[in-house]
Amino acid sequence: MSLEKIVEGESEVDEKDFLQQLKAADEKLGFMREIVEPEENGNGELNGVPVVLKDAICVENVTTSAGSNIIEDYSPVFDATVVERLKDAGAKIYGKTNQDEFGFGTFSTNCAFQTPKNPHDETRVVGGSSGGAGAIVAAMDSPIISIGESTGGSITNPASYNGVVGLTPTYGRVSRYGLISYANSLDKIGVLSKNVYGAAKGLEVIAGEDGKDQTTVDKKVPEFSDLEKTENLKIGIPKQYENLEGIEEGVRENFEESLETLEGLGAEIERVDMPLLSADYSVAAYYVLAMSEASTNLAKFSGMRYGMEKDPEEFDGYNEYFSAVRTEGFGEEAKRRVLLGTYTRMAGYRDEYYIKAAEVRQKIINQFKDAFEEYDVLVAPSMPNIAPKIDEAESMKPSEVYAMDTLTVGPNLAGVPMISVPNGKSEGMPTGLHIIGDHFDEETILDLAYTYEEKRGESQ
Amino acid sequence: MSDETEVMIGLETHVQLDTDTKLLCGCENEQDSDPNTNVCPTCLGHPGAKPRLNEKVIEEALKLAEALDCDVNEDVFFSRKTYFYPDMSKNFQTTQFELPVAENGNFEISLEDQDIDIGIKRIHIEEDPAKLDHVGGDISNSDYTLVDYNRAGTPLLEIVTKPDFTSPQEAREYLQQLERVLEYLEIYFSDTEFSIKSDANVSIDGGNRVEVKNITGTKEVEKALSFEISRQKQMTARGGEVEQETRSFNSDMGSTTSMRKKETEEDYGYIFEPDLTRQELDEERKSAASEKVPELPRQKFSRFKEEYGIADKLIESLISVPAMADDFENLAEEHEPELVASWMTGELKKTLNYNEVSYEESGVKTEWIEYVLELLEEDKISDRNAEQLLRDLVEEPRGPEEIVEQEDLLKAEDDEVDQVVEQVIEDNPDAVEDYNSGEEGAINFLVGQVMRQSGGKADPNTAREKILDRLEG
Ligand SMILES: [Zn+2]
């Protein structure tokens, strides 16, 4: 069964079977935050297509906790715009997928509820922060549209670790209304699916201007799922990515093989120097900006309107009360980011950190714009490694974890679209090819990813 | 020595704008509704909800910027000011930090025939937090506190002056004249639930600066500052030093009390508000807004003075009610300006004030006022009855012709007066004789009798002439 067949009405998903499989797989791997029985929704192009959403995306009357204990029982009173659009298109919503708390993580090991296991090897992580969203696609036989969200690479990463396709659109292409914010200037809702078609179809439905999110752009949404073979593209490889220390041998081999495949499609491949994509600049700028914004977003979880409740009588004033709630409610990584993010925007440090990071970001955007003057797309390995073992991941130092994001934070800071497609295996675990495009040019990266997917399919 | 104390005052004034909807969501901007009825996920800060800017507020800020002669900045963007307080659902306030919408302005006020320039540092836009209702007391002793989010997201313009005031009177005058400008711009109205609040920075003789918070309205500032200045004077007179601190004005007590001593400057950790896009204020937008700025009170004052040559007091009174000033101009085309102005600002305004109704809402029509003016000009009504007529028009609005008829307010016709005169002379032979024997004062008695018998309709001068005619002739 393929998604295309369901969309075209040629085959159908049996709800009961699907639910049963979902529960069984989740029992084993723990990627779901909550499973719900799907309701009858609108009638449209996603009729009967199974959909799940990252926990941070609000679904009316369905627990939405963004992976955090502090809003464990939070039940939104409204649907996120993407949810509204999916429902209108007739999609069946089966629930919410686990994630790192508020998106703070690379492996979904910072989830307050459980750590999902990788369907390819249960001792390994699913990636993050949209980890559950990636794992479910790999774990289920049925096709599915899984809605994820990327701030610094949270779609590419689990797509790569789970061997599925993950599409992160241009910032402003998809409404964030109803997304519990991590870092608003970076957050992008995107799609994970089994193949490029699924990702394209999903984006087609959720994309487009939204009056409820001022950062969405008034641009016509192309028919992304009308995929076309594309050849003879001019492709750049950022040197800073190709030469990154710490890229595993198996990952490097698969990437080189991908390049050969692309060359076989007539691509002209060149190395391009993008100095600001090195970890020293991009990872630092990313974490300063993301944490600064995150620390303000998390301020509302104080026990006043949102967050756990305690007996105010036991506290001497609201400050003590708020502190107690936040101390107990937030996980360790959330507290780290609140503290660091508060520090980087404090008077006296603000210019050195927050403002400087914003300037670096602008320069990174300029480097991407320059690169896209020359090249149709840029490519790189999606992640430097295969999914690590859960215990290894849990014992990494925060700085080591942050360095894992080097390949993804650059394009995320620039707000350009990117797609990760599976490009082979290493030690039995999947790896990914990352294709990065110019702002609002999702079509080119989707077409290339589709062409690559087909070519690889033929050769296997 | 105390007379030579050098006083420096600067004001930060928050004006609540009377827009239809709130600053960042589509909720009705209405605070008097039942608590927490004008709310939505955005102004309640629900996780996942996002703000969207009410463009009208930018237009209103641009109008004020023009009126206060400010430079308008090219870009508009917002910042998050983060602090924890129970009246903020998000625990950050959406405001402007790096770049206010406008800065470097000037506002000329007049006080006792003197013109004083007050420098305007900046005008910026921000949202009001929710209202805390301390039940059973004030913040320090109430039983519990309720939060009403109807106010959360009401648009505010904050106007910051340079420390250019040298007396509490100047500060009061500034606020009152500012309020009038805001009313002329139709962005704030003093007779609604919206309010103006100010914080004042005060120092004397170059000493430490004290911030006085919670000054509501436009009149209390004088009381608050007078108290604070004399407190500072007494302190220095006793050889003490004024401490840098924040004090709160308590209106009931008429005094200021210490809130917090100078500690480290509060750190709000400002970042750019990433959910609201940066937008450019191009010439087109600026000029569209400035076209909506009407003639302002001071300009109107000078023009009235020149064009109509009426007394300053009358002009002051007219321009304090823009609609009245407009109607005055229409009426003054056909009628004597002095007459129009004195009747509008006299009995009419007095009655409006007494009945606590605004000119616009009173239902009094310009044609009605014109009708009264015509009666006066044609000498068909006595001043006393004209006053009565205006009172009736306000208190029970209906056509003045009808009132005049029902209440018989017009002056008596000549032959009617003749008859009364005849009657009075007949009934008062003693007074007639007194007059004839040279007692001229007796005429006053006879005029009084005529007035009384005619029910006030006879004009006293006419009556006097007629009696004289009759007695001499
Ligand atoms: Zn609202």
Image: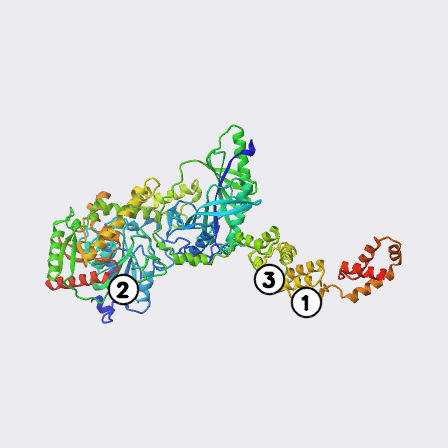
* Quadrant of the image where one finds ligand 1: bottom left
Q: Please, which chain is the residue tagged with disc 3 on?
A: B
Q: Is residue B260 left or right of residue B113?
A: left
Please, what is the three-letter code of the amino acid marked with disc 2? Answer: Glu
Q: Is residue A362 left or right of residue B432?
A: left
- Say few, some or many: other residues with alpha carbon within 10 Å of mark 3 (under 14 / 14 to 19 / 20 or more): few
Q: Please, which chain is the residue tagged with disc 2 on?
A: A
**Residue B325's mark?**
none
- Say few, some or many: other residues with alpha carbon within 10 Å of mark 1 (under 14 / 14 to 19 / 20 or more): few
Q: Which residue is mark 1?
A: B402
> Residue A386 location in percent, x, y?
17, 51
- Which of A151/B120 is in front? B120
Residue at mark 2 to residue at mark 1: CA–CA distance: 71 Å
> Residue A211 location in percent, x, y?
36, 61
User: What colour scheme has been applied to the protein in the rendered image?
Assistant: rainbow
Q: Which residue is mark 3?
A: B333
- Indicate which label's residue lies in the foreground, 2 or 1: 1
Residue at mark 3 to residue at mark 2: CA–CA distance: 66 Å
Dot 3 falls on a residue whose secondary structure is: loop
* Mark 2 touches mark 1? (CB < 8 Å): no
Q: Please, which chain is the residue tagged with disc 1 on?
A: B
